[in-house]
Amino acid sequence: MAQFKLPEGYSNIIAIWGDDVVQRDSQGDYYLNRTNLRTNLFSERNPLGNLKGKVDFVVCFVVKRQGAPDYSQSSIEHNLYPRPLRGIVQLRASSLENLTAKKIGDVLGGTIAHELNHYWLVPGTARIRLEGQLVNTPTADNIEQAFREGEPCPPFPIIGRQDAHWSPFLNAGNTVMDGVQYEQIEATPYSGLCENDNYVQVKTCKPDGNTFTFNHNGNQMAIKTIGSNSQLEKWIMGLPDIPDTSQFLALDPQWVFPSLFQSGLYLELETNGNIEAWYLGYDQGPHQIMAQKVGDSSSTSSISLPSAPLDPNREIGLRTIQENTTVKLQVRTWLNPTYQQLTEASVSIPSIDSGNWQTIHSLSGKLKRIGISTRTYLTEITYMRTYTLLSADLCLSSEGEITPIRLEDLEKEFPNFEAHEQPRLLSNGRLMTPWTGSFLETRDKHDAPKLTMIAPDKDFIFAGIFKLDACVINSWAGLTAANRTIIGKKHLVKFKDFQLPWTNEEQHRRQEQPLNDEYMTLFCIAAQDEAQITDHMIEGLEQLRLAWEDYYPRTVDGHRHANTNLQHSYRANVSIKFTRIRILDAGFGPQADLRLFLRVNNQHKFWPDEHSTKEISSGQSYIIGETFSFTLNDRDPLGIYVSGQDVDPIRNDPMGKVEQAFYGSQNWNAGQNKSSLSNEGDFGARFRLYYDISVEWL
């Protein structure tokens, strides 16, 4: 059974230990058993007292945990009073060690605020009202499926990692939920050039966070957090003064750059008895062309492209020329090129803007294989996998003869990945690489998809009209997509047209104003053994607890607060108003003269009064309007007793009684909805009594 203590000198944090609270998973990592933790916290054994109905959030640091912090919806208990339990978060206790100002800022914004915000912002499949219809936002699987088929990105891809965070394709503002904000928004070169001009170009950046001075034991610390809350998030949380007509910007991305790929011509060159692999084509996006030897970054040559490539009517010419043992890698841009232009005489021109061929690199050797490919060229791609869609119309010119080259006739060299990770040659002649594969092409790894052929032995020109139809980073990327350019179709969505997938009741509970505008938050530390909890951890926990109280109001414009002082008792003004009585059966006759005795706890009244009666008839209702008011502690009982008498000059006959006992706030607070009591009356007399309970917590 778990054991507790309040560490000496720290009256508002709990240390709890026991292998029923902290357990190990199959991989040997430590995790919090939230059910057992809740059972212990909501018990009389708790040194802070039974916290049932007294905490909104529990923030628990787990000793020896290596896994990521997380929030679990299953820990929510909305039926508790006066405070619903909104969730239990588990974090790594290593976060409590060596707390610099930067680390405190990172833990406050990037960890605690992030995980607690999942109470409101676990979107799943969010919905957007569009032309009177609710449209589901796409999941990661929906987006990936569309890309595998060579289709555009589905509309509103705003949900990212684990379908529970913001993607880079939403202007997420000053968020802690793994999103980016748009630093610069401008028209793109699409303007006036394509059928739908509803495109924008944005530059992304990290959220601003909050900056404040934190005073801990006289030590002034300048804290900078990595996020706060956006206007959309504050609207979702039910904060006041945010208009429903406010809008957020979402994009259906077509290009995201810079990104970690090269796409275009692929060449294998024999030189000095060795085979070298070379790329010539788009580098990291539609904005530049690079020639690069695989495995040798010092061999690169690049040029920036003019804005014209962003025009969907523009295309790029890429070609390689073999002349004896000299190989030239050349680039050209122009409208609607022909095979004849692709294979015209080789001329080096200093600027690509002139519309002629520019040699950006020369090699010595003989080409052995030629073709097209897309490769990832950095190995760390967990967050930055890139989807590309490359169009290529190829031809070969040798000895004055121009031969079109069909992509489907080239030899496929595709990596042996699972089906959903496989690159594809689409029916419309595009090479599609999904973002689920690695597609590394390095000196030691050759997983890039290639479409190649054997190069001619004699001099030749191998050329193509190329177009990067799309390059999009994984929507899972979130915050790692900062400092990139995104071009795509824009959507402006009013807040009122955005819906999270909650029932009305759940939505109300999530957006409701907390008691006293405060989220009561318990900070605790949990371990399997007491000896694992060090004094440094306790001190770090106290620092974060106090810093959290300073930080949180800044994230919600001062409309909410975080209270971590759990020592006080709860008191409330409680009123019971008896509203009416309905006579089900008047007893001996169709009518009677009724007097009620009303008692709540130690207060009592008569109705109509001590010396009067009310003439009643079966089937009729009568207004009472008597109110009893008390100031109660949360554990105080509330007892109702009402009895009736049929009063006449000869004798008073009993008309039955009703009783109701509420044992503490868990009961009487739950009775705030209109309630009624009915009796089994003497002599057949029966009535139903109606009352309201109202509670104002102090």
Image (tube, grey):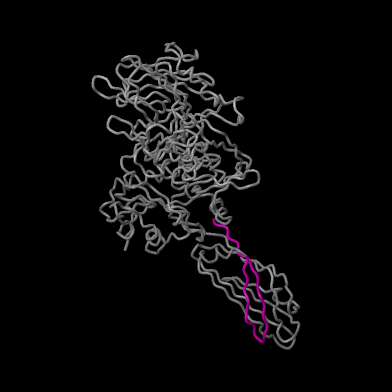
Q: Is residue 643 above or below residue 465?
A: below
Residue 117, how many percent across, how many down?
47, 46
Residue range corresponding to the magenta coloring: 674-698
Q: Is residue 152 above or below residue 517?
A: above
Left or right? Give the position of 15 relative to 479.
left
Which quadrant is the C terminus positioned in? bottom right
In the image, 567 versus 416, the foreground residue is 416
- Magenta residues: mostly which secondary structure? strand
Residue 9, how many percent across, how many down?
34, 50
Q: Is residue 215 in view from this perspective? A: no
In the image, 178 versus 654, the foreground residue is 178
In the image, 72 versus 438, the foreground residue is 438
Q: Is residue 166 above or below residue 506?
A: above
Indicate the quadrant where residue 691 lies: bottom right
Which quadrant is the N terminus positioned in? bottom left
Residue 98, how many percent across, how many down?
31, 40
Residue 187, how many percent across, how many down?
57, 26
